Image: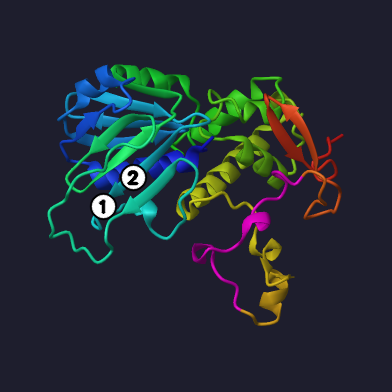
Amino acid sequence: MPEGHSVRRLARQFGDVFTGEALAVSSPQGRFSGGAALLDGRTMVAAEAHGKHLFLHFDNSLVLHVHLGLYGAWSFGGDSTFTGASSIGAPRRVGEQEAFGDPDDDGSAPYAGPPAPVGAVRVRLAGRHGWADLRGATTCETITAADADAVLARLGPDPLRNLRGDAGRFAGKLRSRKTPLAALLMDQKVIAGVGNVYRAEVLFRRRLDPWLPGSALPDGDARKLWRDIVAVMTDGVADGRIITTPPKYWTLDGTTAAKAAAAGVPVPAKSAGFPHGDDVHFVYKRQGLPCRVCRTVVLIAELAGRNLYWCPFCQQPQE
């Protein structure tokens, strides 16, 4: 399931390519025909994300609300002018794909429009220079602005918004429950946007026992946890992927980046497509492998309906 950084990138993408445009909205699949008809021909005025929820606002005070769930994904396409900020300097990841026309096209040629839909396209948005198709989403609905506010009211604070007071609200929600921390981080009413990867990684980064009750975490430690989540998710928006390890753990032609740097070998930046697959996480999907810090074997267990990964030494319960 796409985590909050991917949905934030999607909101930026929609804002860049469609804001201010009257859009043709349809449901090629047919399952969303009624909702599409309410938005067809209307101008998109804003796109926003909160956690894993995407809200596209139109000039008739209606909102297209999408939650991708486990199987949802957007695909974008258009001519060479149809690009947005989230496409720059980062790879495409889960939930977002793009295909453009001739790269030598300067946009002066007439736009031929989107191709015939492929597969079960729930909703298609089409503008002057490109289109966006949605498939497989858990939620796709046209709602009022008041309905959108009600959805937001049910969600916890979003680290990618990081508004004044959010750290305190997060700490309060966390410390009011006796539920294990690893379960609370997956509760979107406690914090919006954190998924299975981020929960495992930030708990390791803070050396927190996943089974520690939220009520047992000191307020200061809860606020430090919030700040670390803000940092790694902000990086996720910029990088287009979840990278939670520092450069010293990255590999470069069989050696570590730290050794390479010590030897005077330049270490590529993340924006250059570095680090690679197995270098980017401390514990996520590393069960049975040695911990990067202490070499203890990383463990796996099910918690809150998802696989949890942790180091039993680095994250051992505190006396």
Give the residue displayed 48% in from the left and 34% down from the top: 158
Residue topped by disc 2: 76
Q: Secondary structure at mark 2?
A: strand
Q: Secondary structure at mark 1?
A: loop
Residue topped by disc 1: 82
At label 1, the amino acid type is: Phe
Q: Is residue 285 magenta?
A: yes
Give the residue displayed 51% in from the left and 34% down from the top: 193
Q: Earlier in the sequence, mark 1 or mark 2?
A: 2
Residue bounds of the magenta highlight: 266-286
Pinpoint residue 71: horizontal percent, then vertical percent. Answer: 50, 31
> Which of the image's four quarters has the N terminus?
top right
Q: Is residue 5 magenta?
A: no
Task: Quadrant for residue 135, please give it.
Answer: top left
Q: Is residue 237 left or right of residue 87?
A: right
Give the residue displayed 54% in from the left and 31% down from the top: 168
At label 2, the amino acid type is: Phe
Cα distance, mark 1 to mark 2? 9 Å
Crowding at mark 1 (Cα within 10 Å: few <14, some 14-19, many 20+)? many
Q: Is 143 situated above or below 300?
A: above
> Which of the image's four quarters has the C terminus?
top right
Crowding at mark 2 (Cα within 10 Å: few <14, some 14-19, many 20+)? many
Q: Is residue 37 left or right of residue 71?
A: left
Q: Give 254 or 155, whichever is nearer the viewer.
A: 254
